[in-house]
Image (cartoon, grey):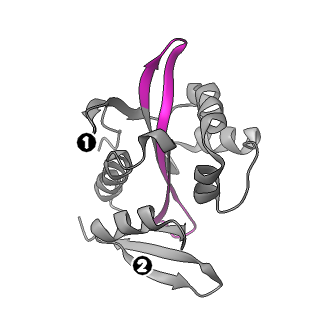
Amino acid sequence: MDFSVVDSDVTLRDGRAVHLRAMRSSDEEEILQAFDRLSPEVRYMRFMRQVRELNVERLREALASLPQRGVGIVATIPAADGIDIVGSATFMIGSEPSTCEFAIAVAAEYGRAGLGRTLLTALIDIARRRGLKEMEGFVLAANQPMLQLAGRLGFSISADPEDRTVRICRLRLGDT
């Protein structure tokens, strides 16, 4: 079965267009540039701590594990040097092979335009097609836009018993 990511153009609520495609190893430099363009607040919400720079070795390991251990999607726009990544979403399969953990980052200037929803909806679809049973994500309680999005998409949201500043978002993917 093909678990590839949709390769398509999407028009956001504000009329801007982005191109969605699978993340690939050759995206390393663009991902590093995209990280550098993220605001400190977006970085904090994504990594749940202050991160000044990405760990390149961890990035390479994550990219090399795709698509066997997970899925990555990037949202790109045309740029002078080729493309810029303005959003990304991943899920990784953990020790429990029927469950995956998602993570999303959207550039601040693309927030509230529907890109997060587009990315998360695509991840959910791919996880279902892969036969996964549950998707979960760890979200800061202060990240209300992400928690609201998760709630609208059917995720249950509960407090993390180990950290009161974190919420666990879980979605049963069903027996598809």
Considering only vertical position in the picture, is 138 above or below 25? Answer: below
- Residue occupying the point 28% across, 67% down: 152
**Is 7 situated above or below 99?**
above
Viewer-closest of 115 and 24: 115
Query: What label does residue 13 carry, if any?
Result: 1
> Left or right of 153: which side holds 142?
right
Q: Secondary structure at mark 1?
A: loop
Q: Callout 1: 10 Å neighbours few (<14), some, many (20+)?
A: few
- Amino acid carrying mark 1 in the image: Arg
Amino acid type indicated by mark 2: Ile
**Residue 174 numbered mark, or none:** none
Q: Position of residue 12 (x, y in %)?
A: 28, 38
Going 42% across and 68% down the picture, which residue do you hit? 147
- Disc 2 marks which residue? 157
Q: Name which residue lies at 60% across and 41% down.
A: 38
Quarter of the image where one finds residue 54: top right
